[in-house]
Amino acid sequence: MAQIGFIGLGRMGFAMSRNLIEASHSVWVYDINPSAVERIVALGGHAAASAAEAAANRDFVVTMLPNGPDVEETLFGAGGVATALAKDTLFIDMSTIAPDMTDKIARGLSAMNIRMVDAPVGGTSEVAERGDLLILAGGDASDVARAHAVFDAVGRQTIHCGENGTGTRTKIVNNFMSTALNILTAETLAFAEGAGLDVARTVDVLAGTTAGRGFVSGAYQRKVLNHDISPEFGLALAAKDLNLALNYAAGLSIPLPVGAAASQIYAIAKAEGFGVNDWSAALETMRRTAALPRMSFDGQ
Amino acid sequence: MAQIGFIGLGRMGFAMSRNLIEASHSVWVYDINPSAVERIVALGGHAAASAAEAAANRDFVVTMLPNGPDVEETLFGAGGVATALAKDTLFIDMSTIAPDMTDKIARGLSAMNIRMVDAPVGGTSEVAERGDLLILAGGDASDVARAHAVFDAVGRQTIHCGENGTGTRTKIVNNFMSTALNILTAETLAFAEGAGLDVARTVDVLAGTTAGRGFVSGAYQRKVLNHDISPEFGLALAAKDLNLALNYAAGLSIPLPVGAAASQIYAIAKAEGFGVNDWSAALETMRRTAALPRMSFDGQ
Amino acid sequence: MAQIGFIGLGRMGFAMSRNLIEASHSVWVYDINPSAVERIVALGGHAAASAAEAAANRDFVVTMLPNGPDVEETLFGAGGVATALAKDTLFIDMSTIAPDMTDKIARGLSAMNIRMVDAPVGGTSEVAERGDLLILAGGDASDVARAHAVFDAVGRQTIHCGENGTGTRTKIVNNFMSTALNILTAETLAFAEGAGLDVARTVDVLAGTTAGRGFVSGAYQRKVLNHDISPEFGLALAAKDLNLALNYAAGLSIPLPVGAAASQIYAIAKAEGFGVNDWSAALETMRRTAALPRMSFDGQ
Amino acid sequence: MAQIGFIGLGRMGFAMSRNLIEASHSVWVYDINPSAVERIVALGGHAAASAAEAAANRDFVVTMLPNGPDVEETLFGAGGVATALAKDTLFIDMSTIAPDMTDKIARGLSAMNIRMVDAPVGGTSEVAERGDLLILAGGDASDVARAHAVFDAVGRQTIHCGENGTGTRTKIVNNFMSTALNILTAETLAFAEGAGLDVARTVDVLAGTTAGRGFVSGAYQRKVLNHDISPEFGLALAAKDLNLALNYAAGLSIPLPVGAAASQIYAIAKAEGFGVNDWSAALETMRRTAALPRMSFDGQ
């Protein structure tokens, strides 16, 4: 089994290092909180007196730290990990950090001929405890393949997102959507309650429709991502429904800020002429506002 | 089988009245577009010269019209349907209209001792053609039960949402969420592309996470709706991730208006002290902004 | 002096009709609230038993009512004013109503050969009491000139905005800006307080800068409206400052929803290449999102 | 006259150091761009080979740099300015940077017994050229008084905002408002044009109303900041006008994202019961969302 250095024993990191130990790896851990280290030692891990000691002469070194500057400091600060790494050590950063920082770290390690995979994870601490994390890996295919020794012990699925930096970027994009969707969900249920509806019954309805189940693996794949924007549900009708809701809520003094922001994109999409098209054509509107190259659509 | 008057043969209404005919009901149809009427007659329906003629002496009269004022005018305008209805006719409005209008119509019919169910539908025109609509019914239980003769021919599922007006309200709330989610989905995929990611691979990731699959029948039912806001995923961490995404996107000049609106609700939630709680506590923040009575939470 | 029918004695209408009486006009008033009518009679006005009686055989008939449907009903409902108007009466609607309704009313009156001016007012009830309203008039120049008999008694300034409907539209646009600016002002001062600043001192600062004094008759006239977007203050720098503020506020859990929405327009503007231009180039970005024809700029 | 070190010769810094020279001060300048240094020397300044050389043994050292990390690096990086400063030198940072960075820099200098004033400026580069900047100074009163030797040469007005850090915070808050107002202004004029209005005439109207002239030194000082929220213009009416505008614009497919965000705050304010109060009561709503202590109002 592998020799692994693991730095960062927060709720996530603790669960992950325990799963590595249970998978029979030899794990040297370091954290600024000594009690977390002691608890891992009680489970069969090895205490390191410093991040550098945890990292020296391992097959893999994993960081699971709160913020990008923490990872940077751990690697490149005084007594940092980078100089302690053996040439054949694979460094794996599983923290969720800013893409610019991942890129900076990747450049710094590359200049030292150290291989790296950025591999932030999806899932809560409970998911981490079950070893069921989703791992979003960015790096060379051979490095990601090698990292499976680690990933398989902590996660149920690894997706190779592309080269270095794509793991971090995919995580950022995924969490962008989930954290915003959380607020949209909150708005919707507060709206239901304010409208006098039974919230539990409303949840049952939403759970069976696009509202509660999402578009991504349904309408989007079938329509706009397939270059087909013939109307399955017309964008102008969607805009009408949203404005109907906003007006009704305004009369009840129920704020719907996420929905109000969304309604403005429908206005842009209609001004662009997409009112007669499928509502998924909103993707092309958002792409244009970001100055991405124009998509082509079947029959247009 | 039933005698049914059906008023409004747009894409949805056409498919629905065809399914009623195929279920062996006798269907009298009216639309301002004579060619739609002719096509229904060719399928075995009966042409009515006016809405009132379509409605006279039927078991059920169904309206499927674009806007609330259309339904009001059809019922109560000169030569309107309301006075043509037999006392034992059940009126079913399946249009998606403003709740205030549904309430006004329900009051008007009630004053004439006419029974009514508001029953807007979920699903696209293709879903309507397959007879697979979701029907959101508001009205007395006995009326909704009776209306199943109609509903079963056009839909796969009927949810009785409560008294008159709740069908319309549930539809409005559902479509609020789906139409806003459409824009959030568009933002997310434009963000992925602008960040240099492979969009198809990103879709695969999202399809397996809360981002793409929603909260409603998962985290929300387990946590905040269950009066439990102990942190499964901490609200302050969610806010941090969202702001990380917004900053990264700002640097790339990628607009994320829905996400930016959502981030402000996290600020309110954190100011209220929910940062340490589960991210689903955002529901309580939205409830408070709407001045709904405060929820109680376990252990608080 | 003129014979004037005045319909609608809310806070604004009461003050306006009193000013008309004080200007020696003969004023017949009607309101659903009899006590308001009585108070006007006590000031020298004449009570009318109905809107139609107030309107019959006058030089001018003025409506000052809460909503568009009120004006429509007053004019065209049963016993409505429109049929009571003499052919040489000028009808003046001074209510703030939806443009579509103004257009509908104008068409209805035009079909009856009745002249109309839409003339909503700017100013609070205190301004109305002083006779200092701003009057935004839409209609033929000759009608607006004739209406000055009324306008001069209630306002300090009349702006002829164009043909019928432009008074209403100018009012809507003006109040759009002021009501949104109210929230931006509230956000800014809550931000100042949350940042630990002395609010009174901050107000003194804002009162001397573009922030508190506006762009409209300064930077915009000098730059973008003059087809000059060479940078006086660079758009990318403005975006940087706004994002600096949003990040600082996020760290303090201070919500800034209007500012967050604004930041997304900077992202679009930068994606369009306006980062190097004057910040007033944001106008062109907003124009493009509304699909207005492109502006030309000097030296481009 | 004073001996001044000036670091950072961008458009703003160049104009400011020239004005210091013209005010007969001895000015040692440093910039990474040698041509800017040469141009200042041609005007009578002195070239320094490094930031530290510019800073050594001066009465005042001024930094005018793009970002916070630039100031930090200049002061505390290798060969940094902080160690070169004489004990009686007053350090003045006139850059616009994040408040957290100003605080960090102030702590660092304080630990070295170096006096500091944070003094970002308001005004464009043209204003800087005229020596008419607004200076927002944070620091001890005696230090700010001493810094007038510099401020009077580059600005027309200095406002002492409070202790160290308040200059930066006031600048951030001011620019928050101005940069957001820029977008609101752009929205408004695009709306006017899309509504078919003459834009120049609309600008004339706005220039005479609260919309174009602001609230800060008018309605806010008179009402909410004076603890008076009796209605001069009712908040619910303001909300009604804003929603009227948003609906009209939605029908024209004109996006108004800033206004849409603002409308949601009116919903919160109305839910809190402020609909009957003055529209400036929106301040209290924003204060509450930020969890600031509640204001008291006269007569409530």
Image (cartoon, coloured by chain):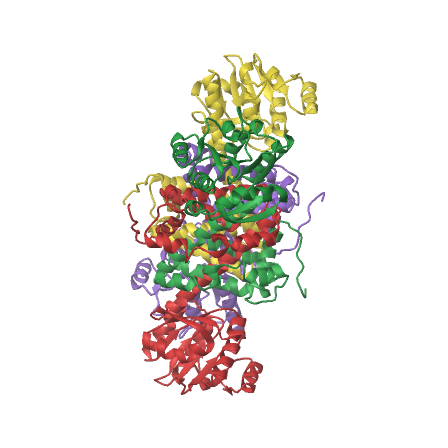
Chain colours: A yellow, B purple, C red, D green
Does residue A55 appear in the picture of this structure?
yes
| Picture quadrant of residue C269 | top left
Q: Nearer the viewer, residue B70 or B291?
A: B291
Question: Which image quadrant: the N terminus of chain C?
Answer: bottom left
| A9 lies left or right of B88 | right
Q: Nearer the viewer, residue D279 or A183?
A: D279
Relative height, residue B192 to residue C224 (above, below): above
| Picture quadrant of residue C69 | bottom left
Does residue B152 appear in the picture of this structure?
no
The location of residue C212, given as percent across then percent down, is 50, 55
The location of residue B88, given as percent across then percent down, is 50, 69
Question: Which image quadrant: the C terminus of chain C?
Answer: top left
| D39 lies left or right of B284 | left
The location of residue C144, given as percent across then percent down, is 36, 75
| A120 lies left or right of A31 | left
> What number of labels is visible?
0
The location of residue B259, given as percent across then percent down, is 49, 44
Relative height, residue C95 to residue B298 (above, below): below
